[in-house]
Image (cartoon, rainbow, N blue to C red):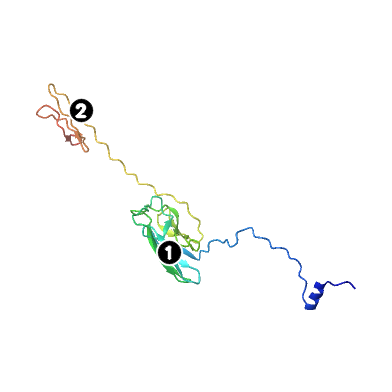
């Protein structure tokens, strides 16, 4: 009968197995705990569209089961930086940058602003191009890891009529074309005044004007010099 080691004999008495050596676990090659943005609070856009204008309402939506207090930076009186406006939109303002606080209840949303965009433009915004305009609501928060922007509204201005409409679900963007600029014709140049006729022994003044709606007169004054004036056409 083969000899039994004291360790094996003790294991048999106690009813346990003898542990064998286990390989060491592999170390991960990526940073432990590195995760992407959670974005449990996001911006949302609701668009109310008419033929001539679109009203954009902005919200913060909380998808978590806990209420949140969110601080957003405000520039020019608005916490939303609206992307997608036509080139040439005036954004400058004299108001300093501030911070606004919003409380968003669990599984709820809160309004954070709105704006009106007209199809033909206004004093601050040029006309919308014909085709697709895609607006997005960007924000700057105290927690960019969990509070994210990106709400989107797809609006179409018809090429033929210039009327606005909401894009259909999954509609591909329509290439945009800028409106044709209105060219105002330049006013007609005034007719040149002929040089004064020379009168022997006289030095006559030069008539420094032009006739916009007539022709220079050929009359002479009492001193023999040309009269500075205009006659009706065909005189």
Number of numbered discs overlaid on the protein picture = 2
Q: Position of residue 89 (x, y in %)?
A: 38, 52
On the picture, is 18 further left or further right than 27? right
Identify the image quadrant of the N terminus: bottom right
**Against 6, is 98 above or below?**
above
On the picture, is 105 further left or further right than 212? right
The residue wearing badge 2 is 195
As drawn, the label of residue 71 is: 1
Q: Position of residue 56 (x, y in %)?
A: 41, 61
- Along the line of sight, the residue nearer the viewer: 119 or 106: 106
Comes first in the chain, label 1 or label 2: 1
Residue at the outermost right position? 1
**Against 218, is 74 above or below?**
below
Q: Position of residue 173 (x, y in %)?
A: 49, 55
* Quadrant of res 221: top left
Q: Decide if residue 72 is in sight here.
A: yes
Q: Residue at x 43, y 64 (%)?
A: 71
On the picture, is 77 further left or further right than 210? right
């Amino acid at each position: 009968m083969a000899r039994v080691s004291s360790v094996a004999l003790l294991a048999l008495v106690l009813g346990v197995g003898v542990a064998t050596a286990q390989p060491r676990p592999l170390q991960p090659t990526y940073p432990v705990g590195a995760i992407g943005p959670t974005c449990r609070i996001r911006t949302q856009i609701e668009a109310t569209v008419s033929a001539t204008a679109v009203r954009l309402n902005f919200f913060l939506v909380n998808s978590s089961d806990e209420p949140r207090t969110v601080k957003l930076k405000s520039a020019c009186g608005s916490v939303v930086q609206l992307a997608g406006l036509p080139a040439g939109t005036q954004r400058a303002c004299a108001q300093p940058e501030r911070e606004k606080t919003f409380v968003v209840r669990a599984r709820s949303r809160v309004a954070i602003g709105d704006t009106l965009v007209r199809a033909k433009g206004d004093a601050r915004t040029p006309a919308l191009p014909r085709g697709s305009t895609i607006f997005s609501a960007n924000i700057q928060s105290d927690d960019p890891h969990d509070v994210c922007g990106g709400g989107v509204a797809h609006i179409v201005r018809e090429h033929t009529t210039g009327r606005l409409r909401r894009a259909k679900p999954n509609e591909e963007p329509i290439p945009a074309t800028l409106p044709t600029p209105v060219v105002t014709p330049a006013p007609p140049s005034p007719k040149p005044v002929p040089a004064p006729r020379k009168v022997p022994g006289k030095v006559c003044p030069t008539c420094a004007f032009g006739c916009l709606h007539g022709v220079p007169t050929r009359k002479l004054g009492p001193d023999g010099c040309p009269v500075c004036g205009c006659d009706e056409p065909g005189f």
